[in-house]
Image: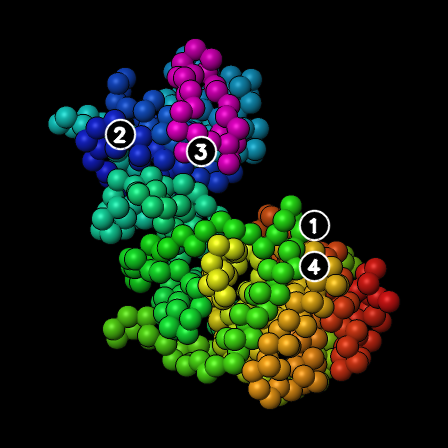
Amino acid sequence: MDVSALERFLPDERATGMLGADLALALRAGDVLALEGDLGAGKTTLARGLIRALAEDPELEVPSPTFTLVQAYEARIPIHHFDLYRLSSAAELDELGFDDAISQGAALVEWPDRAAGRLPASAVFVELTHERDGRTATVTGTGHVFERITRSLAARDFLVRSGHGDAQRAYFTGDASARSYEIVRDGQPLVLMNSPKLVLGPPVRDGKPYAEIAHTAQSVSAFVAIDRALKAGGVAVPEIFAADLERGFLLIEHLGSGSFLDDGRPVADRYAAAAKLLAAMHGRKWPSRMEAAPGVTHTVPPFDRAAMMIEADLLVDWYIPFLTGKPANDEIRSGYHDAWSQVFDLMERAEKTLMLRDFHSPNLIWRGERRGHDRIGVLDFQDALIGPSAYDLASLAMDARVTVPPEIERSTYDAYVAARRSAGPFDEAGFSEAYAATAAQRNSKILGIFVRLKERDGKPDYLRHLPRIRDYLGRALAHPALAGLKDFYRRNGLLGDTEE
């Protein structure tokens, strides 16, 4: 496998520490970063910047582990700092707990040549050499770790081009996709959105990859275009201050940190306010073709039958094998598709609008000091489709990340319906059916996604959400319009404790 390299000139200690912080933003558990360079080349300065960034503590004491050989730090990712200069043999790495350190978190290794081949093949090397009044950092490696580091350094280059080259960066949040977010502090806090182009993956159906069938946004242009349209429509979405559409970086407004939750529980009035915002959005026309930049447009795809089915199939592909210990057979798949066919007919007949797709508490900011719909900041809408208006209300009222009691689900639903009714003619019966259908489709999909995140991506924490999602699914299937689908789920034991 070819080894790649990149260089950075570091004029002073501040730049060296900043490089360490930029490297920290790319690290994940299992990563190893090997530091090379002569005495006085700046390894300790770089290590200090990296560890302080991971620990989110700019004043953290970071002593050199020259005599202790290893220092451990509790941080966003646990990290062990090894100095192998005094190591007499590579066998002593076992006594230092080297393999355990890598399994639990990341490792920073000075004098890596003393490890005698014990570093993983994915290790990335950073060599510091004196140059003029500063030093040059040469970063070499291969694979995903090096790619993440390259991406982090490209984000710094984007900030330089945007006039924020000296800004401090701090990890903010990630999600189930490849996107991540950072807080950028350079005066007022801003948000750096790191959204690499979507890797489509192999064909899964009709010669097309999953993301293409499900209409997942393939570049950051979708976010920019939809952001501009929503802002023009009076929705509180982030201002975009700088954009690199080709490389997938945005510098956007920080909408605040107010939550829709109180001590982890949903606040009914805030959910109702969000429902009223949805009602206002659904009462207007939205274009399907939106401009991201001069000459760059985004066409919002439809939530068509193929997208509905491939999402719902995640339950068959991942959740059923998890539940039963064996893959779903052809009979199950055929019966599942037949049961969903009538539901998709209902969804296709439903009122259509701009469907943001993930309109729930993690993507909503409560700004109680403001008035009206401006109290609700909206994030994460790049995957929007043209689909049933009921979908986003189901996403909100059956929030995948927090348990919404039935009474708050009902008050959220009622707030939406009342707002739509007061604005003019509204098909309440048709909306009720579409709400149940979209809630069933969405929660079936999420059961599969959460199992996939555990089985494929090594993220077992998502399994704790399964009982909640099963409960939501049971609520949705209680609607008489979904009787046939409910019967299939019950006969095949897919509802667990919510069967009745």
Q: Which residue is mark 2?
A: 14
Judged from the image, the secondary structure of the residue bearing numbered disc 4 is loop
Q: Which of disc 1 and disc 4 is earlier in sequence?
A: 4
Q: Which residue is mark 3?
A: 56
Q: Extreme right residue here?
A: 500
Closest to the observer: 43 or 479? 479
Judged from the image, the secondary structure of the residue bearing numbered disc 3 is loop
- Please indicate, yes or no, whether residue 496 appears anywhere in the rendered image: yes
Numbered disc in front, either 1 or 3:
3
Q: Which residue is mark 4?
A: 404
Q: Which residue is drawn at the image coordinates 66% and 81% (left, top)?
A: 431
Left or right: where 423 falls relative to 136: right
Q: Which of disc 2 and disc 1 is earlier in sequence?
A: 2
Numbered disc in front, either 4 or 3:
4
Judged from the image, the secondary structure of the residue bearing numbered disc 1 is helix
Left or right: where 479 falls relative to 426: right
Name the dominant secondary structure of the magenta segment. loop
> Tags 4 and 1 in contact by the CB under 8 Å rule?
no
Q: Amino acid at mark 4?
A: Val
Q: Which residues are magenta?
A: 53-79
Residue 331 is covered by the magenta coloring: no
Q: Which of disc 3 and disc 1 is earlier in sequence?
A: 3
